[in-house]
Amino acid sequence: MKKYTIGALLFSMMFAGVSAQSLKSPDGKFEMNFQLKQGVPYYNLKYNGDIVVEDSKLGLRLFKDTSIKFASEIAKPEDVKFDLNNGFTKTEEKRDSKNETWQPVLGEKKNYINNYNELAVTLHQDTTDRNIIVKFRLFNDGLGFRYEFPQQKNLNYFVIREEDSEIDFPTDMKAWWIVADYDSQEYQPQTTKISEIPGRWDQAFDKHSSQTLIKNAVQTPLMLKKEGKNPLYVNVGEAAVLDYSASHLEVDAVNFKFKTHLTPDKQGAKGYIQTSTVSPWRTIIVSPKAEEILDSKMMFNLNEPTKYTDTSYIHPTKYMGVWWEMIIGKSQWAYSTADNVHIGVTDFSKLTPNGKHGANNTKVKEYIDFAAENGFQGLLIEGWNIGWEDWIGHNKEFVFDFITPYPDFDIKMLNEYAHSKGIKLIMHHETSASATNYERWADKAFQLMNQYGYDAVKTGYVGDMIPRGEHHYSQWTINHYYRIAEKANEYKIMVNSHESVRPGGESRTYPNWISAEAARGTEHEAFQGNNPDHQTILPFTRWIGGSMDYTPGIFQTKLDYYFPGDKRFVKTTLAKQLALYVVMYMPLQMAADLPENYKRHMDAFQFIKDVAADWDDTKILSAEPGDYIITARKAKGTENWFVGGITDEDKRDYSVDFSFLDKGKKYEATIYEDGKDADYIDNPQSYHIYKKQITSKSKINFKMARSGGFAITIKPIVK
Amino acid sequence: MKKYTIGALLFSMMFAGVSAQSLKSPDGKFEMNFQLKQGVPYYNLKYNGDIVVEDSKLGLRLFKDTSIKFASEIAKPEDVKFDLNNGFTKTEEKRDSKNETWQPVLGEKKNYINNYNELAVTLHQDTTDRNIIVKFRLFNDGLGFRYEFPQQKNLNYFVIREEDSEIDFPTDMKAWWIVADYDSQEYQPQTTKISEIPGRWDQAFDKHSSQTLIKNAVQTPLMLKKEGKNPLYVNVGEAAVLDYSASHLEVDAVNFKFKTHLTPDKQGAKGYIQTSTVSPWRTIIVSPKAEEILDSKMMFNLNEPTKYTDTSYIHPTKYMGVWWEMIIGKSQWAYSTADNVHIGVTDFSKLTPNGKHGANNTKVKEYIDFAAENGFQGLLIEGWNIGWEDWIGHNKEFVFDFITPYPDFDIKMLNEYAHSKGIKLIMHHETSASATNYERWADKAFQLMNQYGYDAVKTGYVGDMIPRGEHHYSQWTINHYYRIAEKANEYKIMVNSHESVRPGGESRTYPNWISAEAARGTEHEAFQGNNPDHQTILPFTRWIGGSMDYTPGIFQTKLDYYFPGDKRFVKTTLAKQLALYVVMYMPLQMAADLPENYKRHMDAFQFIKDVAADWDDTKILSAEPGDYIITARKAKGTENWFVGGITDEDKRDYSVDFSFLDKGKKYEATIYEDGKDADYIDNPQSYHIYKKQITSKSKINFKMARSGGFAITIKPIVK
């Protein structure tokens, strides 16, 4: 049936006498063709002459009015004459190209290469006398395109009903996907054919603190693979999502076609637009090699260089946290037994302590001592501020003030103590998704941070958004995240946001937003669990647009250690946890477990102490989404290399070829591997550490256990 | 039919064996009875033994969850078990009383008397083990009641689906009403029987910049009159609307019954409640005399005393403004010919001036000169700041920054010039209803005001609210208004808000919020017109809860003076405009017309120069809603009196009896009355001024023209 459709399309093209614009990638391997068919814009994409994306429609549908009211205009039938998806003629064509090298403030490599050919087609809609521009950039790793809306007489303000950018694949493909949702990204990845997505969709989600699922849609970035003799890997995403809502992909499982589905606001409107402006880039990264997908910097290249005048305060940070013990239920964020508190009214010093408050002076000092002794730079403390008694589930607007510590958290003393030992405390601003409240307090909160010497904040957006009815990924909320990033920059503060929107390379423009969660992190191991293949998929999906704060480093994986009979466990060997520090690019790098657990494995902990967090170079040695990733990285400003390898639920052998090392040099490698009897279920803490002298000609064989892995520290031997 | 219903109710009461709680007013004239009938709370109200309000139901319906999501829970059927309107038993009854005198910061009298008896009934709902309290306060001028929600195990957070407080009148009454709307209060008042409201409703509104009408509902305060031999005037309103949405009244025109209808938020939720808290007071002011309705201070008495530590900066202010010339279209708020500007991006100095910008240095200096010469304290300037080119109709969030003047407005020079002449400029913060944006800029905006010596701001909320889908009178937005009032207090700034929610006596608690528009002001004379009876109704409705910034003083009523052929005119005689300064209580008192018009009538303008804006005493000499109001007021700290009288579209004679003056004293009265041939259509500028010596025994007859009036300045003659 699909084949028949293609035939029909080709037939109609021939007889419509359409003229196409063609664009090639710098290396000539990619070809993009744009054309109007009966006034409707289409593009396709070829790689080495083969069709990767068939003729796919472009355009947007608009609301009639620029002022949309709750449940009134939304319910009105669509009025095609306001749409920007038909009746176009081509009036101009501009071409450009670029081949530049730029340096990220923090990155996987010292230099990122931005090399593309560009085609910008101006389309004129005669009936409304409006122009839009469709801009294509063809890189050696794929295609990006966006809409541009120039300011003009008849196009000043409009409200988007939907963006209908299609990506039509010729064949069914393997897909690594999560369900689409306006408020959560923290779902288990699924692996099916495109054609199987609807059948699996209903079983692909668990319950989250805020969720608004989009039936039969999937999230970006979406990882795809054309299987067979000549495999092709495809990543579908979006970049530079600024003053626009984040998009999902509606799935046409019969025709293997995807279509943009934007996040609406509370009124059902999907974007309030004032010209001149541009849409985000829609990205299609393509390669016959999975490794090259991981290596792509296309999303970053599609973002603008930063306008920040000072980025010197932005630095990679290795940190510990008073955190995992709350996640597993050993201690609590809240200080008291109360369950209904009023910020500014309740006297917290008069409440009954619950006896399990994690962020207390004694415990924090113990964490500071351990973190300092082991060379960490930061310590995150969650639950330090008043309000945690009823922070969740009540849609409470004035839920935190971000400036008042609990009675047992001496903010001045603890910061001074930390600084005396070379540690900076990391601030925690859980907003409970009350973004309006956070904006009201942000200046005072950042001023408090400056006063006590905090230079990084972890923000959180758990629960339903306030403004009520707004979504985590709608235009208003995305503007909020960037407003906070910009304000943090004014105070020279780095941001690590949780439950915020997934990134699309925007850290190029906002380099102080150094990390985000925006996917299912380690914490879910203590909730409803992560599958062993999860970490082999995330770098192909969530990571394509920017670093994730995955919070690895759990050594005590079985939670019955704390709570006899508890069946929960982190589905990993200890060695795999080490490998994550290399496989996962994290300039903000947490050692998430409790000090007491590291103390029992100080030999293995040494790798976490040694591993770098910022890099001059990265080599993806081998990778297959859902199966394994082997990555080597060269630490910033040194000759030291680190290698990490992980596998999914299957045992797997891998031989590391060290040919990436400088020829003729000798190195000492410290190897951390799964023990012979290691197994993520039966024996996760079995590991083996040894040292070995290596050169660029060396190879080392590894036997990774089920959900196991290995890590290597490589340092040149100084003669 | 109605009579039959009453009979049936009395019958069922007798046989159900219900026990009622009774409460009397301090003077014994009012009696309120509370009872449960099959677990449902009811109250009634009698005056001098006659039923004013029949047994009327109380209670609230709730949503099942405290976290309401767009279009999901809203659409669910109601679940009666979550409601707080049934299954109650009485568990406690507390009585209290108060007789105090307090002094408003600014007011109509030096002392306000707060004298009531109170009954608080604790109701227990057995099925859910929840308590609520219904609290009644019975004054000598009527009843107030509210719900109280104590913090308790089973009542911490809930979301209101609707408050169903009923007011059931035994007979049809005359009603002065405007249509209910979540976003506008600026409608023409209607005068019909209650039974006629539905028939008139569809013709009772015009088009406003933001409006969300509530079919067949009317707004509070609602003015009613039982006509006949023993007339009774009734005012239905609400007081102390804090952290709660404003209410409207659904009309049952067959049974002459009204029911509360709260303003929803964008999700359809009508209040997010955290205990302990209280609802606003529902108020029923009752008197056989219309004058006593105007004299009632019940709404203020039902608010809490202010917690402000310093109110010394709050002062009555007589002001002029660069304003009316924009309203009528003679000049413009915007500076340039552009129609799409970006705050922070657009360089306004490079735009083409439109040549009609009102807030320019030359013109503002002229206004300063005139205002200073004539003893005014303030000058409002609208359109001083960038952003007016596209401020309306686009639902644009970042519409103003409130700190950047247009190129032709030299903020430093103009303030220095004004101060040198004893004038303070009044700041203007039009928000375009982008409340989130205003909150972001409020600190910087108030700091700018402090820097240049502004001590008052006029705020505005024209257009659809942002957060988008929120309403002007919903809980979130009401919290916003008070947040701004409190922040202004931090900066010692007085607030006069336009398009904000109507007040319910809250200026007792927030005395720096000295005035508000919140009804159809003078500006509408230049839009779709006000009826001649409008000003005789407003004091009975909008004014019951607090001062209105009505902006009177238009001398040049016919707009063809500016624009030949223009049919628009202000429906008033010149003398009536003078009277409004007394009839309308306005501590913030504008002389709204252009200096050039006052210069042609300096003899009449003298009254505006003389009239006070703050008062030691007020006597409502005579009044009938919709017909006429005659008011005498004694200026603060002096022995001077001012009298104002206005009439509707009918000519009317009135004889002022000066017996309110001190006995034995002699006074000089300056009388401003309609000329013999005055008429609001044919000859509005015909007036007559004369002086006369008077005592407390004097009487003066006035012949008010159609939509005419008179004003008197009375000063003791010093021997």
Image: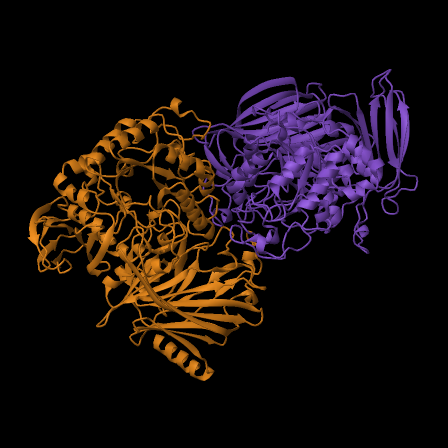
Chain colours: A orange, B purple
Q: From where the camera sits, is residue B65 visible?
A: no
Q: Position of residue A541 (x, y in %)?
A: 30, 57
B569 over A218 or under it: above or below: above
**Residue under the image location 34 percent in, 58 percent down:** A300
Q: Position of residue B394 (x, y in %)?
A: 58, 54
**Residue under the image location 6 percent in, 52 percent down:** A693
Q: Which quadrant of the structure image shows residue A620?
A: bottom left
B204 over A453 or under it: above or below: below
Q: Position of residue A16 (x, y in %)?
A: 47, 82
Quadrant (top left, top right, bottom left, bottom right) of the N terminus of chain A: bottom left
Q: Position of residue A488 (x, y in %)?
A: 40, 43
**Residue under the image location 26 percent in, 59 percent down:** A294
Closer-to-camera residue (A455/A295) = A455
Name, please, the residue furthest toward the bottom: A15
A462 over A30 or under it: above or below: above
Q: Which quadrant of the structure image shows residue B290?
A: top right
Closer-to-camera residue (A377/B207) = A377
B467 over B112 or under it: above or below: below
Closer-to-camera residue (A465/B419) = B419
Left/right placement of residue B92 relative to residue A229 reads right
